[in-house]
Amino acid sequence: MHRLFTELEPSITVTEQNLADRVRYILRSNIFDGAELERLRREAVPSSNENATTEGAVPQVAEQPAHVDAAESTPVVADSNDDGTFTQELEIEQMRSTLEEAIMETRSTPLENRPRLPRIALSKRNRAVVRALNPMLVTYLEASRDLCETDSILFGAALAVCRIIGAKLSTAGRTTGQSSAIPAWRTRIEERIAKARALIGRLICFRSGNTRPRIVRTVRMAFAGTNVSLSQPDIMQKLTERIDDLKQRIAAWGKRIRRYTERSTRFNQNRLFQSDQKRLYKSLERPMVSGTGPVPNQADTVAFWRSLWSEPVNHNEGPWTEVVASQCAGITPMDPVTITPDDVAEAVRRAPNWKSPELDGLHHYWLKGFV
């Protein structure tokens, strides 16, 4: 790009870094759209259209929006072995700026607040974008100090690819727990169950001989719309039938809620198994039962543990330790385990593409494409 600029404008002295900074500023500020950039390119380099149709031209990828929420389109993404034309330099600079912004955003975002990476189509266009960004990661990965920083770099690269190809990103974070919202129908059923239980209690009180005005009024409301009168001789039988009917209704309502709860639990567990198996197994473990006795004070706690660990004790192990030591003397020590990059590459190669073992949600597909 610098060579073409010096040929077109020999009277202007500019360094390569200054020219690259100006191009990056133009692309970030969106001063020109894609059509305007194409028109300027044609005016500056009229012969570039002929170069694009030669035999050595590289297949290019269709235009895609640079960001999900942006309306502008990115220039055509070329393969990594292009001929260095002005348009391709602009494309590389725009992709580099998108990658830099994504990495900086990922580094400053907590792990649980990172966007959820979607599954992208395994098309030639998407693979070309991954191959184009792969050489740009060398500088970042070489300067990485630990695995956490390496993970943030790879996540930022995956985020940049999704933005370049126009994939839809979810900004809801990485929370995979069950929702605390209770359906409205369940709330109504629980209210019905509470009212039915209260009514059963008052009917039982009336059957036991409690004739207070409030109890009598409730019993009359329970038999409203029927031909049952409190002065009938079989009123006790009617009360028993009414109580049994309410109990059956409560059982049916409770069974409906249990069916929904079991189905919701199975659904959430299956979804959690697909995203984070380790977290699912932890949630299935039996919860620890804490003690219900009085809490000991600090002085008693310190005295108890000090009596165990601060007092010198002379142990007499006996002769069996010498026998075991003599038997183990001829055992060859195990060689230290060394994990090589080839071992990591082989493990990643055999892993499913769209599994994300950790909470960051970085799929194995990105490890295969960027490593």
Image (cartoon, helix red, strand yellow):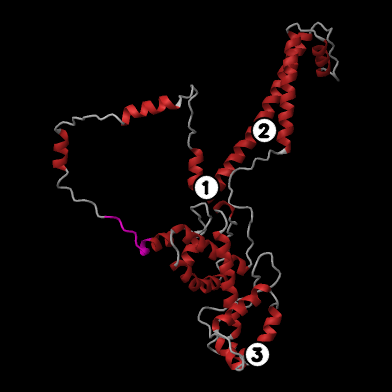
Q: How many marks overall?
A: 3
Instruction: Answer with mark 3 or mark 2, whichever residue precedes in sequence.
Output: 3
Tell me the residue at 70%/80% (across/down). 35
- On the rendered structure, is 198 left or right of 151? right
- On the rendered structure, is 77 left or right of 218? left
The mark found on residue 273 in the picture is 1
Q: What element carries label 2?
A: helix
Q: What element carries label 1?
A: helix
The majority secondary structure of the magenta stretch comes to: loop
- On the rendered structure, is 334 left or right of 21? left
- Residue 180 coordinates in the image, percent (x, y): 65, 40
Q: Are marks 1 and 2 in contact (CB under 8 Å)?
A: no
The mark found on residue 162 in the picture is none
Q: Mark 3 points at which residue?
A: 44
Tell me the residue at 48%/37% (across/down). 285
Q: Is residue 196 above or below residue 163?
A: above
What's the residue type where badge 2 is placed?
Arg
Magenta range = 336-343
Q: Mark 2 points at which residue?
A: 256
Q: Quadrant of the C terminus?
A: bottom left
Spatial distance from mark 1 to mark 2, Cα to Cα?
Answer: 26 Å
Classify residue 123 by image quadrant.
bottom right
- Residue 80 coordinates in the image, percent (x, y): 51, 78
What's the residue type where badge 3 is placed?
Ala
Q: What element carries label 3?
A: helix
Spatial distance from mark 3 to mark 2, Cα to Cα?
Answer: 72 Å
Spatial distance from mark 3 to mark 1, Cα to Cα?
Answer: 56 Å
10 Å crowding of disc 1: few (<14), some (14-19), many (20+): some
